[in-house]
Amino acid sequence: EAQVTQNPRYLITVTGKKLTVTCSQNMNHEYMSWYRQDPGLGLRQIYYSMNVEVTDKGDVPEGYKVSRKEKRNFPLILESPSPNQTSLYFCASRRDSDYSPLHFGNGTRLTVT
Amino acid sequence: KQEVTQIPAALSVPEGENLVLNCSFTDSAIYNLQWFRQDPGKGLTSLLLIQSSQREQTSGRLNASLDKSSGRSTLYIAASQPGDSATYLCATPSGSQGNLIFGKGTKLSVKP
């Protein structure tokens, strides 16, 4: 089954403790992206990657890191999480084409205390 | 910088009604515009994607139109059903194709 898989689905952590949220897709998509969704603010893009070893900042990259060493994986790293990073996070992927729709994972709900 | 607005934020209709959801954008030089559905606690599901050269796309009871000159897209849902209840979002690239900007969505409730 074609899918975007995020892990974990739920995560509670404390301020300053480094964490990684994994994202993997099995569709051989070139493009991958991370979003956060907050009430009243909607979905905002954190980082995106057009292909392996190519990453760019979205609208809210501060406090986050990403890497794209393999085509299928695009982990989101929070080196020193803070409470304002409490949010619902989504990973998405698509082919590198104008005609390609975006496929989303089921989300990771992160709470930083 | 591209801004995407969806009005209304919420909409409640009786089952069977035809309805229109609106999406407006400030920069008409878009590559494409995509409509999504989000169910509570779930990720987004792509419904329709309209290229900048197209005027509309159809999938079943859904029809999306695009008018770049006026900076508007509409999602038409025919014969609404309770199962259509969800939040509907539109999104379009800003600047580079990689940087997607989302509207805040319209929460649709279809009453039996």
Image (cartoon, coloured by chain):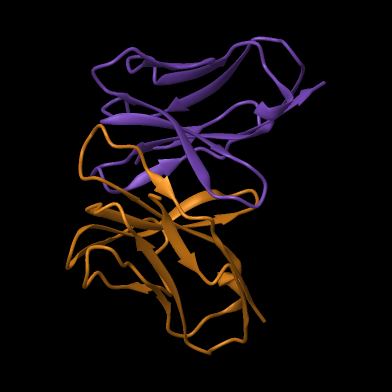
Chain colours: A orange, B purple
Place of residue A44 in the rendered image (x, y in percent of width and height, measured from the top left):
47, 52
Residue A84 is left or right of residue A32, and the answer is: right
Residue drawn at x 44%, y 20% is B73
Place of residue B42 in the rendered image (x, y in percent of width and height, measured from the top left):
60, 50
Residue A99 is left or right of residue B15, and the answer is: left
Establish if B51 lies above or below A19: above
Split into 4 quadrants, where in the image is the C terminus of chain A?
bottom right
Establish if A1 lies above or below B108: below
Place of residue A111 in the rendered image (x, y in percent of width and height, measured from the top left):
64, 74
Residue drawn at x 47%, y 25% is B24
Place of residue B21 in the rendered image (x, y in percent of width and height, measured from the top left):
58, 21
Establish if A29 lies above or below B93: below
Q: Residue furthest right?
A: B112
Residue drawn at x 54%, y 59% is A107
Residue drawn at x 25%, y 42% is B95
Q: Residue furthest bottom?
A: A17
Residue B91 is left or right of residue A85, and the answer is: left
